[in-house]
Image: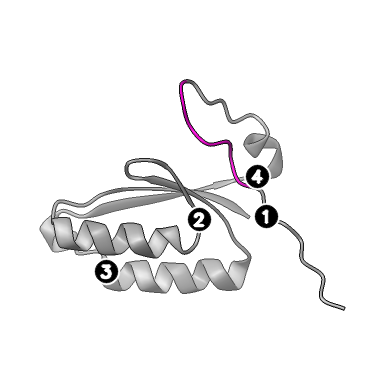
Amino acid sequence: MFYLISYDISVDQRRLKIAKLLEGYGQRVLESVFECDLELPAYRQLRQKLNRLIKDEEGDRLRIYRLCASCREQIEIIGDGPPPETSQDIYII
């Protein structure tokens, strides 16, 4: 499944940790926006890690949008930016 994840974190150190975490799961497309193409187990793992980092009481906000295949095909990019990543199937024989 394809996920669009955006965040607004006021504490620099925590914002950096979240960005580093998301870089391991997807592609940064804007300053605080990532696109991630994840299987369900990887998504669940990411959610657990994000839940531990986000501090509601300090005003942290994070949104996750699931995009279906047909919605993903309609992504428009205006200006300079990377195209949406597609996961590559890997076969080990």
Q: Which of 88 and 63 is in front in this view?
A: 88
Amino acid type assigned to the residue bearing label 1 in the image: Ser
Was residue 80 drawn as part of the magenta stretch in this picture? yes
Sequence-wise, the earlier of marks 3 and 4 is 3
Q: How crowded is mark 1: few (under 14 residues within 10 Å), some or many (20 or more)?
A: few
At 68% from the left and 34% from the top, the residue drawn is 73
Was residue 26 drawn as part of the magenta stretch in this picture? no
The label shown at residue 68 is 4
Q: Is residue 77 left or right of residue 9?
A: right
- Measured in 3D between alpha carbons, the distance from the residue under mark 2 to the one under mark 1, in whole angstroms, is 10 Å
- Secondary structure category for the residue under label 1: loop
Sequence-wise, the earlier of marks 2 and 1 is 2
The label shown at residue 53 is 3
Sequence-wise, the earlier of marks 3 and 1 is 3
- Measured in 3D between alpha carbons, the distance from the residue under mark 1 to the one under mark 4, in whole angstroms, is 14 Å
Q: Is residue 18 left or right of residue 40?
A: left
Q: Nearer the viewer, residue 26 or 58?
A: 26
Where does residue 87 sit, x and y in percent of width and height? 67, 55
- Secondary structure category for the residue under label 4: loop
Amino acid type assigned to the residue bearing label 4 in the image: Cys
Amino acid type assigned to the residue bearing label 2 in the image: Gly
Q: How crowded is mark 2: few (under 14 residues within 10 Å), some or many (20 or more)?
A: many
Above/below status of 77 relative to 64: above
- Measured in 3D between alpha carbons, the distance from the residue under mark 3 to the one under mark 1, in whole angstroms, is 26 Å
Where does residue 51 sit, x and y in percent of width and height? 33, 69
Mark whose residue sits in front, 3 or 4: 3
Where does residue 58 sit, x and y in percent of width and height? 12, 59
Q: Which of 83 and 7 is in front in this view?
A: 83
Do residues under tags 3 and 1 come within 8 Å of each other at their CB atoms?
A: no
Specify the segment rendered in magenta.
79-85
- The single residue placed furthest to the right in the displayed view is 93
Which residue has dot 2 on it?
Answer: 26
